[in-house]
Image (tube, rainbow, N blue to C red):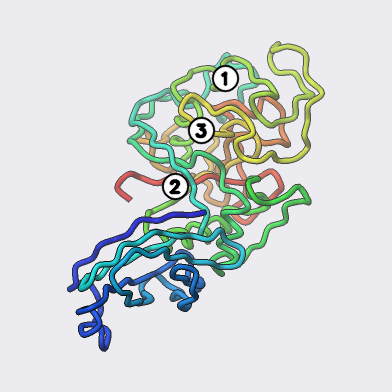
Amino acid sequence: MRYSTILLLGVAALLPVPGATRAAETTGAVRLFTIPGDAQLFVDGERKGTSPSTAQETFLIHLPPGEYRIEARRDGFDPAEEDVFVAAGTEQTLQLSLAPEIAMVSIPAGCFLMGSPPDEPERDADEGPQHEVCVPAFEIGQREVTFADWDACVLDQGCTEHPSDEGWGRGDRPVINVSWDDIQEYLRWLNRLTGKGYRLPTEAEWEYAARAGTTTPFSTGACITTDQANYDGTFEYAGCGRPTDVNLGRTAPTGSYPANPWGLLDMHGNVNELTQDCWNGGFEGAPADGSAWLDGDCTKRVMRSGSWYGYAGYMRSAYRCRVAPGFNHRSIGFRIARSPSS
């Protein structure tokens, strides 16, 4: 069940409605909008109408003084409800969000060495040279965007792509089979609904958050195990012990493994995560301020994290790979980010 807060607005901010002034003498006015729109609206279980399709419009209800439970329902979404106190002569606006909420984690500003040292096992040349990057504070999704998140966009006609789950299940599994271009459509929809400036993380932000203050190949240390991340554990990494027989061969629901030191889930493995950045074959000339590197080969975009499809070496915090913006795959997903001022 989703709950939202009441926004109190000055009378001057509200559009006049015929008869509203007279009704306000003995009643209170509640203006409603929902995210997404076109939801059925109920007051104490009694159907009152349908919310507008956009947040620029509101559904007006006049109610006698008292306390009410207002609920919004739409097929394919969790219902949302709020207890509201109405006083005579007052007007208030209530936003009810039915769309799945993505928990964001605040990442502190700081500096770190981006890339891998020359002696890191299975290092690729494109992971260097190591260079200091100072990242401003930002927020990043605690988990990868899920099928439930994506399907809300499809239901609201904000996303045209209806990706396959490969028969593994939807819900809280990370969305897969989406491209960088598809994700831009999702972000436009999310920002149209919320106005919060969501975007993909930059490559520097992603690595900074994945490392979470560590300097080792993984946030778990020099080694990682299949108890800590979803990847193909049938291959050995750098003398970290005998490989296991664990290879799920598919995604796992988000949060199936322990969080990293900053509380982020699945920063190693599960799905490859797309970032904002264009591809460059190394870090010569890379931004040092944490911003997206939008020079270089923009026919390719940077991915991080490794996935269920890869082995331990691909789970390293510094590992990078690239993909065309229009390409999708069952190993590709994403998480969202935003700047604090957004």
Q: Secondary structure at mark 1?
A: loop
Q: Nearer the viewer, mark 1 or mark 2?
A: 1
Q: CA distance from mark 3 to mark 1?
A: 13 Å
Relative to 131, say whether 285 is above or below. below
- Name the disc covering residue 220, or none: 1
**Three-letter amino acid code at disc 3?**
Leu
Give coordinates of residue 43: x percent, y percent: 44, 70
Q: Secondary structure at mark 3?
A: loop
How many numbered discs, if any? 3
Q: Looking at the rendering, which quadrant does residue 63 occupy?
A: bottom left
At 49% from the left and 25% from the top, the residue drawn is: 211
Q: Which residue is mark 3?
A: 264
- Name the disc covering residue 294, or none: 2
Q: Secondary structure at mark 2?
A: loop
Q: Residues within 10 Å of mark 2 (few under 14, many from 20)?
A: some
Q: Are marks 1 and 2 in contact (CB under 8 Å)?
A: no
Give coordinates of residue 207: x percent, y percent: 49, 31
Front in this rendered view, residue 112 or 156: 156
Q: CA distance from mark 1 to mark 2?
A: 31 Å
Q: Is residue 276 visible?
A: no
Q: Nearer the viewer, mark 2 or mark 3?
A: 3
Front in this rendered view, residue 261 or 172: 172
Relative to 302, say whether 185 is above or below. below
